[in-house]
Image (cartoon, grey):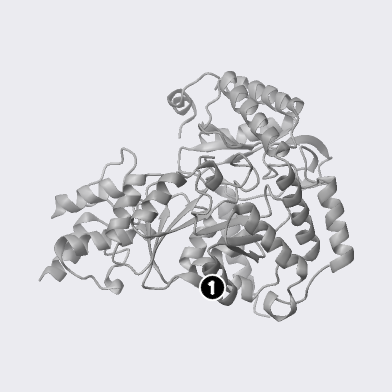
Amino acid sequence: MAYTNKTRGMYTEILSGLKEAGLFKQERFIHSAQAADIEVEFPAGAALKKVINICANNYLGMSSHPEVVKAAHAGLDSHGYGMSSVRFICGTQDIHRTLEQMVTKFLGTEDTILFPSCMDANAGVFEAVLTKDDVMISDRLVHASIIDGIRLCSAMHDTFKHSDMAHLEEKLQLHNDKRLKCVITDGVFSMDGDTAKLDKMVELCEKYDALLFVDDSHSSGFIGKTGRGTHEQYGVVGKIDIITTTFGKGLGGASGGCVSGRKEIVEMCRQKARPYLFSNTIAPPVVAGVIKVLEILSASTDRRDKLERNTEFWRKGLIDAGLIIKAGDTPIVPVMLFNAKLAQDVSCNLYEEGIYAIGFFFPVVPQGAARIRTQISAGHEIHHLEKALDAFKKVGKKYEILGKTKQEIIERYGM
Amino acid sequence: MKEIIKEYVIKEYVEDDTDVTYDTPLISGGIVDSFSMVSLKRFLENKYKISIPDDKATPEAFDSVNKICVLVNEYLK
């Protein structure tokens, strides 16, 4: 046994350091299905508390949708629990290919390949399609999974200032000698809830002969008039070379992800992407569930329309209450508190009021940009949002932040 | 040279009112992340018509304007 007391002590010290720095993450146990109303055990051992969830990625309320649950049950009965194999040995069922074809149609691309998660899709795609002769130029606020994928790829990597198109153009000029240039962005940025300027990015990529990669995980199913994603909102369907997205948020909330885009790039992933080659794909009941989600969303825009209305109500309510939010129109609505301790205290107070929302602070967001990130769902009814607004007003009044400017909040609580 | 490099660093990497001097720690001070170093390296190579080997373009060598000047001068000779 090599796990000595010295080794144990080393890890204990690191974990203690995380606790002292306020960076230690604690799970809260939910005893119900994922929905607007949930029952939570927190801290561990505490009595169950009924709260309204406003921090899930359950944008379309599909996580516990009865038709999706029923379809997953049917998929379990007809196709079994698991595959016990990676895709290219004996791990591909008819429903896997059906789902790939449905995603291709839904996103308006040429082809799609499933991955165990979007984290895996992002980890695998760059290494599969780019080499040391190429360059990746990414927005400075892209998701951590993209950063990991970039680290695994031998291509040169550079960045451009967040959503700064002039800076992106400078970088495209700087790296114009490379064999391939790949511009990389999130569709909706998960911390601020803003969208990438995909119309401008497509223009620049066409001008400089660059590939465009978009991670649309926080968009698929609800951004754009028919919920296809940010490429629909910006009128560039068919012009994004690589889209990655997840089935763990709006599209059902279970798990799985994909790369969708140019057929040759998808085929390169099928031949070379390591998370695809060396890991089981999405389990059959989940595949059956996602197929049902896409059927529901393709038949009607009711759910994304309701989400849009809920988002407008929520954003207006917070502004009217005198809170500072990040501007935008997506269901990711950060309530800015700037100070890390204040964000944690407000989160705790909201929980006491029956509202489940989490504080985010450095290093997840920049120093001095601490916030409560709220996420709205089509599963919310107006009474949920009214109760949550009342709680925000009550807690905001307690901390005397209603109607205050950023400067006034920072002067009182610090960065 | 120092002023040109400092100006580039500010324009390229500083998005608030952070003060940058010739000795400000750029990498260890969190102003330039390791991913973004590549544009600084390419800027220097294009501007001064030099080629800096990848193994010399280390975070330590790029950690301040003064250190960058030492590195550039080495390849200008």
Residue at the limit of the structure toward the right, as seen here: A77
Question: Which quadrant of the figure contains the C terminus of chain A?
Answer: top left
Could you tell me which residue is drawn at 52 percent across and 33 percent down? A328
Q: Position of residue A82 (x, y in %)?
A: 80, 70
Could you tell me which residue is drawn at 39 percent across and 55 percent down? A205
Residue of label 1: A268
Left or right: residue A383 versus residue A111 is right
Occupied quadrant, residue A212: bottom left
Quick one: SS at disc 1? helix
Q: Position of residue A313 (x, y in %)?
A: 64, 25
- The number of numbered badges drawn on the structure is 1
> Residue A181 or A119: which is nearer the viewer?
A181
Left or right: residue A146 versus residue A59 is left
> Residue A146 or B10: which is nearer the viewer?
A146
Q: Position of residue A157 (x, y in %)?
A: 38, 63
Amino acid at circle 1? Met
Q: Residues within 10 Å of mark 1 (few under 14, many from 20)?
A: some
Residue at the limit of the structure toward the left, as seen here: B77
Residue B26 visible? The answer is no
Occupied quadrant, residue A341: top right
Q: What chain is tagged by disc 1? A: A
Question: Which quadrant of the figure contains the N terminus of chain A?
Answer: bottom right
Residue B8 visible? The answer is yes
> Residue A62 or A351: which is nearer the viewer?
A62
Could you tell me which residue is drawn at 68 percent across and 47 percent down? A250
Occupied quadrant, residue A358: top right
Could you tell me which residue is drawn at 32 percent across and 51 percent down? A169
Q: Examine the rendered structure and indicate whether residue A173 appears above or below residue A337.
A: below
Left or right: residue A356 versus residue A215 is right
Q: Position of residue A413 (x, y in %)?
A: 49, 29
